[in-house]
Amino acid sequence: MQDIAAYYGTNWIQWWALNADIVNPDGELMEGSIVSTGHIYSVADGDVLDWVVRKFGSSREQILAHNYDVASSDMDRIGIGQPLCIIPNSCATHV
């Protein structure tokens, strides 16, 4: 879990909270296991990528790394209802 969390720029506790079906955080994962790496946020009317970044205390790089469909297009062009995988920073101070 620590390796996966480090890869996604988060900590193992936050990552474990996203994967309630993993009972033992110290146990090894089976190869091919499907895991959640972030929360899904549905883009609202008027949202732009930089606003989503600030809202969740994330970064453009992190959002683009988790959302290949945004990274492969105009980065500021996100559509209403579009799902974005977000790893929020629960300690961010932006409101």
Image (cartoon, rainbow, N blue to C red):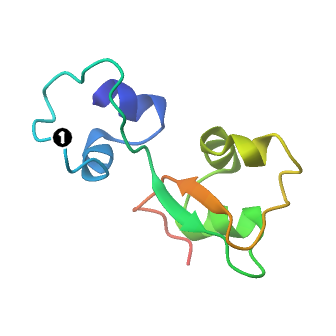
Percent x, y of residue 62: 61, 44
Tell me if 66 is positioned left or right of 90 in this view.
right
Q: Residue furthest left?
A: 24
On screen, residue 52 above or below 60? below
Percent x, y of residue 74: 89, 51
On screen, residue 5 above or below 16? above
Mark 1 = which residue? 22
On screen, residue 93 above or below 36? below
Q: Say which quadrant the N terminus sits in.
A: top left
Q: Provide the secondary structure element on which disc 1 rests.
A: loop
Percent x, y of residue 20: 21, 51
In the image shown, does 3 or 41 lie closer to the viewer? 41
Tell me if 80 is positioned left or right of 28 in this view.
right
- Residue at image position (69%, 44%) is 64
- Residue at image position (39%, 45%) is 36
- Residue at image position (65%, 66%) is 52
Residue 13 in view of the camera: yes
Q: Say which quadrant the C terminus sits in.
A: bottom right
In the image shown, does 78 or 63 lie closer to the viewer? 78
Residue 88 in view of the camera: no
Tell me if 13 is positioned left or right of 42 in this view.
left
In the image shown, does 94 or 41 lie closer to the viewer? 41
Q: Amino acid at mark 1?
A: Ile
Is disc 1 surrounded by few (<14), some (14 to 19) or many (20+) residues within 10 Å?
some
Tell me if 6 is positioned left or right of 29 in this view.
right
The quarter of the picture where residue 79 lies is: bottom right
Percent x, y of residue 35: 36, 38
- Residue at image position (16%, 35%) is 25
Labels in figure, total? 1
